[in-house]
Amino acid sequence: MADVEQAAGRLKMRLPKAGTIEVVPSVLSADFARLADEIAEISLAGISMVHLDVMDGHFVPNITIGPPVIAKLRKVSDLVFDAHLMISEPAKYIEPFAEAGADHITFHIEVADEPLKLIDKLHDLGCSAGICLNPETPVEDIAAVAPHCDMVLVMTVHPGFGGQEFMPEAAEKITRVREIIGPDIRIEVDGGIDSRTTPIVVSYGADTLVAGNAIFGKKDRVAAINAIRSAWK
Ligand code: DX5
Ligand code: ZN
């Protein structure tokens, strides 16, 4: 189990320390009518985190889940909840997501007016903080902010949907992110990750591999997680 840190109301789960490579299933491609069972099944693979994609129909052209769903899932899982906020007004919603039970919260640089303030607020709430950049966003846009985060999320598809084609040119940005943040901050990569693309992103310096379709598109989710793991070992 991951380390915990005392926060108002409950113990927040901490990200695994940098230095290990983690597969992080994204439930976007899971059966939403059976989310608790789906999370129980992936837990059998010995994962430490689960990726929860939050979409508002404004920043991205899709709508998913909000704090009420996360609060219910919190009661049935002690995995690190990694909430990826694909929403236009992160400042307005960070607190409800933290209260619902998100441990790590990522917001997008493209919609953050005062990213350093948001990071401070997340830390005050007991959460770890993530900054995300879209495929077309230059790495330099996060250069001043990234060293203050606990994890940087590099999108390798345009956000909004699971099962899209991996964008190799977006993945190349990982190398520059790693130069900026050094070895102690995690780099998460999200979009089109499977056993074919994993060796590419790991070679660039990513250590936190979000995968939706490559796991929940398979009947045996544990075998699918292990297939991704064996791609870098
Ligand atoms: C897409 C989401 C991803 C998505 C990835 O906007 O942020 O987390 O679930 O799905 P796959 O792994 O299928 O590309
Ligand atoms: Zn995501």
Image: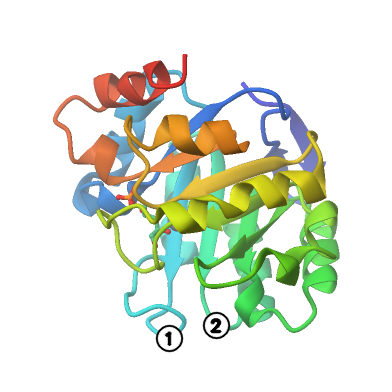
**Where is residue 194 shown, x and y percent of the image?**
33, 36
**Where is residue 44 shown, x and y percent of the image?**
36, 19
- Indicate which quadrant contains ligand 2: bottom left
Helix, strand or loop at disc 1?
Answer: loop
Classify mark 2 as within 8 Å of ligand 1 or not, answering yes or no. Answer: no
Which dot marks residue 58? 1
Q: Quadrant of the N terminus?
A: top right
- Type of amino acid at the residue the image marks with label 1: His
Q: Find disc 2 in the rendering and name its residue.
A: 88
Classify mark 1 as within 8 Å of ligand 1 or not, answering yes or no. Answer: no
> Residue at coordinates 26% horizontally, 19% vertically from top-left?
223
- Is residue 124 found left or right of 24 in the rendered image? right
Q: Which of 37 and 55 is in front in this view?
A: 55
- Above-or-below relation of 8 to 3: below
Cα distance in 3D space between marks 2 and 1: 6 Å
> Residue at coordinates 40% horizontally, 78% vertically from top-left?
60
- Is residue 185 found left or right of 162 in the rendered image? right
Q: Nearer the viewer, residue 191 or 31?
A: 191
**Where is residue 66 shown, x and y percent of the image?**
45, 67
Q: Residues within 10 Å of mark 1 (few under 14, many from 20)?
A: few
- Above-or-below relation of 140 to 51: below
The answer to the question of whether label 2 and label 1 lie on touching residues, with beta carbons closer than 8 A, is: yes
Mark 2 vs 1, N-terminal side? 1
- Is residue 212 found left or right of 47 in the rendered image? left
Query: Looking at the rendering, which quadrant does residue 162 occupy?
Result: bottom left
